Amino acid sequence: MLQCVVLCGGLATRLRPITETIPKSLIAINSEPFLSHQLSLLRSQGVQNVVLCVGYLGEMIQEFAGDGSRFGMSLTYSFDGPSLRGTAGAIRNALPLLNESFFVLYGDSYLPCNYGSVVETFLTSGRPAVMTIYRNQGQYDSSNVEAAAGLILRYDKRDRTPAMQYIDYGLGVFRRSVFEQPPANPEDDLAQVYQRLLANGSLASHEVRQRFYEIGSKQGISDLEQYLSGCTHGDAANGSECQTEVIR
């Protein structure tokens, strides 16, 4: 299975005062830090090598997760440093740790889909990147993707159209070459990288059927706690209701 980059450097201002003293990745979900749930899910999908891009209170994340041995995987860390880098900038900063191809997901996302199927799409597409999408139809958040025939046709978080029935699920696969050229803006965002790939026809799509979960809001935390209260990671990959087994 591919290496996975997890973007954990955000300030999580929407969750203050909780995140004034702990990073978002360590927020308790059903009495366990969210990162435990996230890493356990990744391990269940066969991911064994994870790079955590950390910033705000990143030392606490490193102290908690260590080298990843108790999660059955290898963890390494890339610290943002004193200047803001943006999500894509954080990935560029981590390039010395990265393989030729890798997953990217956000540090507040719990994504119970089949990661192996995403890799298959990436390998067969012949393109340098794949965006996973979910037919959201405005249900869990505002839809922002128009897609057809395995390609992203339009992606915009601000200028949305009725044809956008999908949403960016939050899981991407990239070749490292996508990030090797320095951007004009040092605070480059992953959404801008997707836009550049889309502009030259280099962005494939993979549709997943399982809804996404996130801890970026109090409602998101509540939804995830309810979901995890009855699920195993194997069932999670198939979209079933299930009881998660978290490694402590």
Image (cartoon, grey):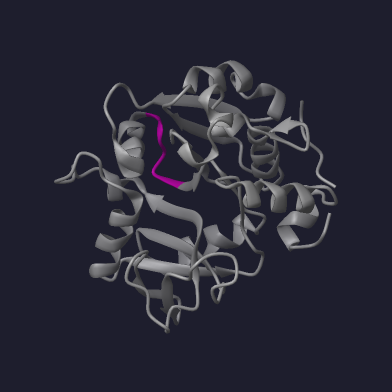
Determine if residue 7 is in view. no
> Is 179 colored magenta in this rendering?
no
Q: x and y percent of residue 48 in the render?
A: 61, 36
Which residue is at the far left? Answer: 184
Tell me how many marks there are: 0
**Span of residues in magenta:** 97-102
Relative horizontal placement of residue 79, taking residue 19 as reference (left or right): left
Which residue occupies the foreground of this view, 124 or 180? 180
> What residue is at 36 percent from the left and 32 percent from the top?
94
> What residue is at 71 percent from the left and 23 percent from the top?
70
Relative horizontal placement of residue 65, taking residue 93 as reference (left or right): right
Write down the quadrant of residue 118 in the picture: bottom right
Q: x and y percent of residue 139 in the render?
A: 59, 71
Q: x and y percent of residue 84 in the render?
A: 29, 32
Determine if residue 86 is in view. yes
Which residue is at the far front? Answer: 17
> What residue is at 55 percent from the left and 34 percent from the top?
24
Vertical relation: 50 (above or below) 200: above
Relative horizontal placement of residue 180, taking residue 61 as reference (left or right): left
Rendered-image quadrant of the C terminus: top right
Which residue occupies the foreground of this view, 143 or 42? 143
Vertical relation: 99 (above or below) 163: above
Write down the quadrant of residue 240 in the picture: bottom right
Which residue occupies the foreground of this view, 86 or 152? 86
Relative horizontal placement of residue 51, taking residue 217 as reference (left or right): left
Q: x and y percent of residue 119 in the render?
A: 53, 58
Vertical relation: 180 (above or below) 56: below
Write down the quadrant of residue 212 in the picture: bottom right
> What residue is at 26 percent from the left and 45 percent from the top?
188
